[in-house]
Image (tube, helix red, strand yellow):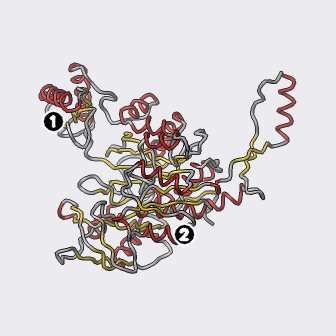
Amino acid sequence: MALAEAICHSLISPHNKYQLNIMREKGFGLNKTQDQKKKKLESAQPVVQEVPDISAHRVLVANRGEIAMRIMRACKKLGVGFTAIYTPEDEASGHVALARSLGEGKNIFRVSSYHDANELMSVADEAGCTAVHPGYGFFAEDFRFARRVKKRDRSMIFIGPSWKIIRELGDKINTKRLARSLGVPTVPGSDRPIYDEMEAEHIAKSVFEFQEGQGIERPLVLVKASAGGGGMGIEEVYDPDQFRSVYRRIRNYALRQFKDEGVLIEQRITDFNHLEVQIVSDRSGLNPVHFGTRNCSIQSTGLQKRIEVAPGFAPETLEYTFDANRVLTNIVEYSLTMAKKVGYDNVGTWEWIVTRKGEPFLMEVNTRIQVENGVSACIARVRGHEGVDLVAEQIRIGLGEPLGYTQAEIATEGVGLEYRLIAEDPDNNFTPWVGRIEHFSWKAEPWLNVLTQIPLDKPYEIPTEFDPNLALAIIWGKDIDEAKARGLSFLDSLQLDGVNGSGEPLKSNVGFLKSNTPRILKF
């Protein structure tokens, strides 16, 4: 039984109203005698709190491709209506066909752009949507968009964290400052823009010394414009004696380009594993839980994830130079500490760097559903039930339902592995491949779930306007060895053929995934 369905069975009343049996801890406005009597009465009789029926909602699926399909299927599972969108370039996408087959009423609209907030609001109004699910990318971490959804005249629900939380945690400097105030380790360096040269030199010196203590043979610091972005205004410094001149150069550049001479000084960590912690919390913000850890260390040369694994390490099978169980426990506890502090109220991911010495440093918080949420879901069990769907959970709690379970009722079983299948050339710096998919198929297995927007019954022209992501393949195994063996079996069974405009055959990252599978979770 799917998780959402299992929770519904345990909480739903005959009138289709969700109820919570909760014990009131306090009586307000009562004298002592009345308070004591009330506590005795309430200790014997649970109070029923009604929660609105979510089936009255309609969700605007403000995204495309496989994540749009996951959102639609989750809505269908929950009995919630949805409206999907597509651009002319996406006419042949599987998410359009799925919307037409699953939806009812005004369930599919053509738009000129997924980036046009005005157009999305118009579609939502025309379709009568009461909520917006941004998926990932596009508007998913845009607090201004989330605020607009909430505060417009015809208010809707933003299915994600509250806009104030997105604003607070979306600012990397603010996130680092918050983390440090709670004793959560962060990448050494400044947690605010530095305008004073002497202070900048002091921070740089401490970062160099820290790296020397780590045994790094050639320490370096990053000096970057705090107001910059997209790689602009960043330099690496290997020689402490050169720091002052680089700092002045970046400060002057920042002032010219961004009208703000603030500079950040950070350590550049090069030998690390990239881990994540999956957090889920309802709108109360009081009871966040975690769905374990993930390891996303196998990436392209541009540091784009290609293989994700859950849990983050496998100390039962593999050897590490540090206490891997302790590291996993620590990053989970640190992430929950921050989630509780800010009153986190939806799904989110805390991203971590773990050094070869087993030292974790918080990188950032992603205030959205992640591409790789399915790899955590496939090993999760709630009250012993398989079939956890974190997208459905996000929608359910986003629309106001209580979480309905505690951390003690969440367990994990086995190892999950996710491959990102992409039309790209790993031998040419992962350059995207453009062309037509002629054939795409694989051998179905009970331990395999493939998520794709690529039609399987006809050729498909990859839109050049978007990244050439083809599919996500999620594999489950009882342990890391079985998961890797099954992963390779899937890749061997895969039939993926295509041709570009020049008649050249498809280039994909399948070979890259195969060659990197043996080193999964090794450090």
Disc 2 residue type? Leu
Name the residue beneath numbered marker 2. Answer: 102
Q: Quadrant of the N terminus?
A: bottom right
Residue placed at 30% from the left, 79% from the top?
Answer: 438
Judged from the image, the secondary structure of the residue bearing numbered disc 2 is helix
Judging depth in this view, the residue of 86 and 314 nearest the camera is 86
Answer with the quarter of the image where residue 365 lies. top left
Judged from the image, the secondary structure of the residue bearing numbered disc 1 is loop
Task: Reply above or below: 312 against 441.
Answer: above
Task: Reply above or below: 20 against 10.
Answer: above
Disc 1 residue type? Tyr
Residue 82's x, y, as percent? Answer: 54, 60
- In primary-sequence order, the first of circles 2 and 1 is 2
Q: Is residue 260 left or right of residue 387?
A: left
Judging depth in this view, the residue of 133 and 449 nearest the camera is 133
Answer with the quarter of the image where residue 144 lies. top left
Residue 47 seen from this side: yes
Name the residue beneath numbered marker 1. Answer: 238
Residue 41's x, y, as percent? Answer: 86, 36
* Disc 2 and disc 1 in contact, CB within 8 angstroms: no
Find the distance from the CA under tag 2 to the CA under tag 1: 57 Å
Residue placed at 73% from the left, 46% from the top?
Answer: 50
Residue placed at 60% from the left, 59% from the top?
Answer: 80
